[in-house]
Image (cartoon, helix red, strand yellow):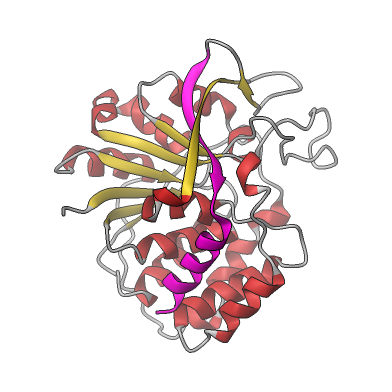
Amino acid sequence: MSKQLVLMDHDGGVDDYLATMLLLTMDSIELLGVVVTPADCYIQPAASATRKILDLMGFSHIPVAESTVRGINSFPYLYRRDSFVIDHLPILNQSEIVSTPLAAQTGQDFMVKVLREASKPVTLMVTGPLTTVATALDKAPDIEAKIQKIVWMGGALNVPGNVEKNWEPGQDGSAEWNVYWDAVSAAQVWETQIEIIMCPLDLTNNVPVTSELVYKMGRQRHYPISDLAGQCYALVIPQDYYFWDVLATAYLGHPEFYQLREWETEIITTGLSQGRTKVVSGGRKIYAMDKVDKEAFYAYILRQWAR
């Protein structure tokens, strides 16, 4: 069976690195590259940490590209500074030399190049805002035909968002951060004919990162990938943290764990609800991950990282 071609686009949050690590363990996937979008991170340490992870896992032939897009509403700096922490973890700094190449092109140009050169349509695995995708489509509309589907961690359909009012005064609490960073670009992607499969907060709210799971990762510390995953999750365990990006990415490995539901939606780009993914009759049809076998998912990630 031929492998599914995937291009990863993440935005440097803690779970973005873990989603990338999970993707690299999937035997059915051929990863063509990783684009880092400068949203929930600072771009240099985020790209550096990504390259070191690829080195650690033996995939130093896969290039990493830095997107130069900009959003409308910045992530809080307390979120973004985690990229520096991950880049400095000892497990990622056992060598002074980083072998994984940094692409000469910007992330958006790299995306165009990879899609154009791909032998068949490619799945975009996006765990950050859709800005790099929208910018690439603007630059090269022909690449739409080379995108098989977008699997995206983003949006909140029938639950409150996670853009907290104390961080962003004037918001009504309906926005999810990956949309809110640049709702205009998300709306632009909504105007395409590309199949979109979302992993919204409606599902991720039910799949928390628990101390029990982090301890289990730690007990697999003789496996460097599980050790790294445990260290990353340990950084965020004092807060309410969920399997956002990892849950979305696991869909590529085991779609049978999930139930999808079709919704008609629109992206709100202005006003108090800017960044909301709203369910509306006659709106853009998307698929959302609606249910997941939690125990199968938890067992899967522990097993995949035990290597």
Residue 267: image quadrant is: top right
The C terminus lies in quadrant: bottom left
Q: Is residue 65 visible?
A: no
Left or right of 102, for residue 226: right
Residue 275 placement, left or right of 170: left
x then y, percent, for residue 91: 50, 82
Count of numbered badges drawn on the protein: 0
Give percent across and percent down for residue 151: 43, 41
Quadrant assignment for the N terminus: bottom left
Of residues 178 and 298, the one drawn nearer to the viewer in this rendering: 298
Query: Would you place residue 61 above or below residue 73 in this image?
Result: below
Residue drawn where x is 67% and y is 58% of the image: 208
Left or right of residue 198, residue 122 in this image: left
> Which stretch is magenta?
283-307
Question: Residue 233 sits in which quadrant?
Answer: bottom right
Q: Residue at x 61, y 44 (%)?
A: 203
Q: Nearer the viewer, residue 257 or 130?
A: 257
Q: Looking at the picture, how far across and down is residue 258, in whole percent?
A: 48, 46
Query: Is 239 placed left or right of 198 in the picture?
Result: right
Q: Is residue 130 magenta?
A: no
Q: Residue furthest bottom?
A: 222
Residue at left 29%, top 35%?
148
On screen, 208 above or below 251? Answer: below
Q: Is residue 287 magenta?
A: yes
Residue at point 29%, 34% (across, down): 147
